[in-house]
Image (cartoon, rainbow, N blue to C red):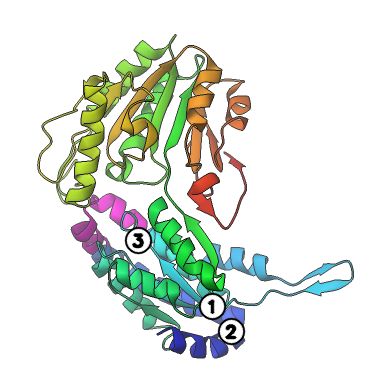
Amino acid sequence: MATVAAQVQKSWRETAVDERINYIVEASKLAQDKAEQLAVLLSQEMGKDIRRSYSEVMGCAQGAPYFANQVCEAIQSRQVSGATIEYVPLGVAAVISPWNYPLAMANNLLVPALIAGNTVLFKPSEETPLIADAYIRLFNQILPDKVLQIIHGGKEQGQAIVEADINIIAFTGSMASGKDIMRRASGSLKRLIMELGGNDPMIVLDDADIDRAAQFAVASSFENAGQMCTSTERIYVDEKIADSFEQRTAEIASQYQIGPWNKEGVNIGPIINKHQRRKVIEHIDDAINKGARILLGGSDHPDHFIKPTVLADVTTEMRMEKEETFGPVVSISRYKNINDAIRRANATDYGLGAVVFGGSSATDVGRQIEAGMIGINSGVGAGGMHQSYIGIHHIDFL
């Protein structure tokens, strides 16, 4: 498949960029026409509620103009010191995407690659093959033959793609898988763009809007059943407002309901598989056994689900302080000194995102956190540093 992709890429790169964009726009229109069917399939396969699935589908279907503008600006010829710099496609791109946002994560990687003139070998997660296949079938009704190829399989298939004769690998997934990809790609020095998860901290200052901060803490921790790389995983709150913050957080979290994707009122769906569910329960049990206070949930989780859980007094010895839990858990710690909160926020190999809630000093605190995205009284977008992100290094303040 890589050989065919390389052969086809020769003609695809010669296709005018405006024409490549037209292909993507027309394919995206097909996806928009099928948005309801795609959303149902996404929910059936991955488990998220239908509202979130529909939003994900429509975000992909309507994103073509945005990507077209971004790519066109990035590849535009430039004059520097009397010389002309021109940007050419790399060749064949491998896109390996995760299960938690099976369309959005794939679309955000493969569409820019195609517009830029690369052909794409796309391997979706083996957890969500059906929705990926349905989406790519729509694209391939419009695109020239073999410009975009989908390859199904598990770990072994992914490793084979990485080791094939390709030019760039775009991957979103775990840190362990990312390191394995780097080792396998190093022999031929393939280019890499990788987002490798996070353990995102949130710092709540003593002058923060408590209700607003608590609303964000719960929404971020519970989004997609906590199965989101930029979910808030660790919350450090000033002890002067901790009682009020904890109480309000538990109140908000208690309003969330677990259940199947098609049940009205559900906003926390099932955990993707038994392995991930067991990991979340192990993190919760570990914290409770080491002294964490249960403010909500904590135990007796129904099959396939994790009840909305809020824990306080989380310490550095607990697994959820050090590892990415990836489940619907709000993890709260208190601090006396802001420097202690900053130190704990930075005590991780991850560096995807972070948020700070507070008044005039919030931005100054945010500048001391080692993460690629810093939200000041708001959430974060895309980017990262340390072992969370490879390929682009910048810091965004939102």
Residue stretch in magenta:
39-56
Kindly identify the amino acid type of the residue bearing the numbered disc 2.
Arg
Cβ–Cβ below 8 Å for labels 2 and 1?
yes
Tell me the CA gap for discs 2 and 1. Answer: 7 Å
Under circle 1, the secondary element is loop
Q: Pointer 1: residues within 10 angstroms few (<14), some, or many (20+)?
A: many
Q: Position of residue 51 (x, y in %)?
A: 28, 50
Magenta-colored segment: predominant secondary structure: helix
Kindly identify the amino acid type of the residue bearing the numbered disc 1.
Asn
Q: Pointer 2: residues within 10 angstroms few (<14), some, or many (20+)?
A: many
Residue at screen point 56% across, 89% down: 10
Q: Is residue 380 magenta?
A: no
Cβ–Cβ below 8 Å for labels 3 and 2?
no
Residue at screen point 31% across, 46% down: 227
* On screen, residue 44 above or below 90: above
Q: Which residue is mark 2?
A: 13
Between 212 and 311, the residue placed more toward the observer is 311
Q: Earlier in the sequence, mark 3 or mark 1?
A: 3
Between 260 and 98, the residue placed more toward the observer is 98
Residue 63 shows in the view: no
Q: Position of residue 106 (x, y in %)?
A: 40, 64
Assign the C terminus to one quadrant of the image: top right
